Image (tube, grey):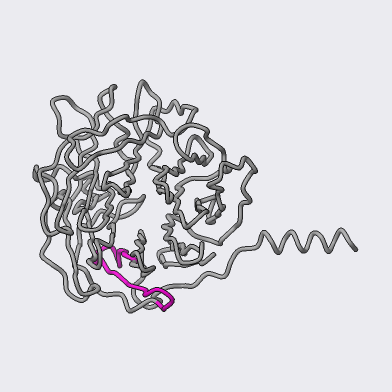
Amino acid sequence: MLHRALLLVALSLASSLTAQVLFEGLGAALEQPQLAVRDDGALALVFVQDRRTIRIAVRPSGGDWGEPRKVCDAPDVAVGMRRGPRVAWSGDVLVVSMIESRFDAKARKALGSGNLLVRRSADGGRRWSKPVRVNGEDGSAREGLHALAARGEHVALIWLDPRGDTPGTRLFAAWSSDAGRSFGADAAVHESPSGSICPCCHPSLCLDRDGRAVALWRDAIEGDRDMFAGVLDPAGERITDPAPVGEGHWKLDACPMDGGGLALDSDDRLMSVWRRDDSVYWSLGRGNERRLGRGSNPSVAVSGATALAVWQRDESLVASRLPLDGASTAPEVRVLGAGGYASIAASSGGRFVVVGERRDGDRCTLVAFEL
């Protein structure tokens, strides 16, 4: 009897959280959610509706989600496998970025301009500016993978771009100092010593307290598809001190299409999560990697003295709180529920909001968890 009671307790602890289904009835396919948090705790959630419209919803601190507003019609938006729009708060201004590059499976080619475009809203998403093209050469962002970050008036973007004297994919970047109204000239900020970084894994980006960009990407050096991080100053033209975040290597002659996740703690220490082979790892700083478990497509956020990693395991999302004090205890892994491609935002009081996709046949809904 005691064993049965203990088993029931264990099953209860392992059971999934109750998911909130967001914006039911809005469309048959709501995909690739991305969250951003403002300094006062307000959240912004951008996503793609029915593969042709970009929408955004705002949740004030302590409140409920507002009705999603249309950012723009985007029939050729890059969407799927971490391709999709990104959102950031630049002060009280909402900044949304997207790439026009839709792959047509029948025609076997990408449609759309292949450009990285930015729109901004100063009234909570009611009205949006005309798009600003960020990539300097028309069509060069066609791979559709990019990252966005903002702090104050400074906005930074990085993306995968094939421009260069030799074939291969490079990491390009551009900066705005006026909350996304305009951007300076773009530049190649990192090139693999083997000629090309991993060409279809999304990069990640944060801005530290000094306004520098901290980037995470998957490199490809002598056959190893390992995650690297480095720092880019707004006045600089190259990422300085690029170095692996983990200790092991992943020898792979293919692209895993899995770019990991990045966050900074209150001391601007780098917190990274990433996949290698069939496992997800995390590291505070560089090196000293620790395995979280089997899975893919991880993301991470920091709130106060704790971090939360969320990743996919089979058809479910699982999560683990990670210590920022250097403790070596193995973190507990918790099942959230069915879903994938999660984004995380830090909420108040050390809590987190997680939004992911949940697929059922041809339908795709957005599900939210709070923990």
The magenta segment: 45-64
132 or 154: which is nearer to us? 154
Quarter-of-image position of residue 7: bottom right
Q: Is residue 32 above or below residue 140?
A: below
Residue 213 lies in the magenta stretch: no
The residue under the point 45% across, 38% down is: 285
Residue 295 in picture, x, y percent from top left: 53, 45
36 or 356: which is nearer to us? 36
Q: Is residue 61 above or below residue 324?
A: below
Q: Main secondary structure of the magenta part?
A: strand
Residue 82 in picture, x, y percent from top left: 35, 51
Q: Is residue 24 above or below residue 226?
A: below
350 or 174: which is nearer to us? 350
340 relative position to 293: left or right = left
Q: Quadrant of the C terminus?
A: bottom right
The residue under the point 40% across, 38% down is: 256
328 or 261: which is nearer to us? 328
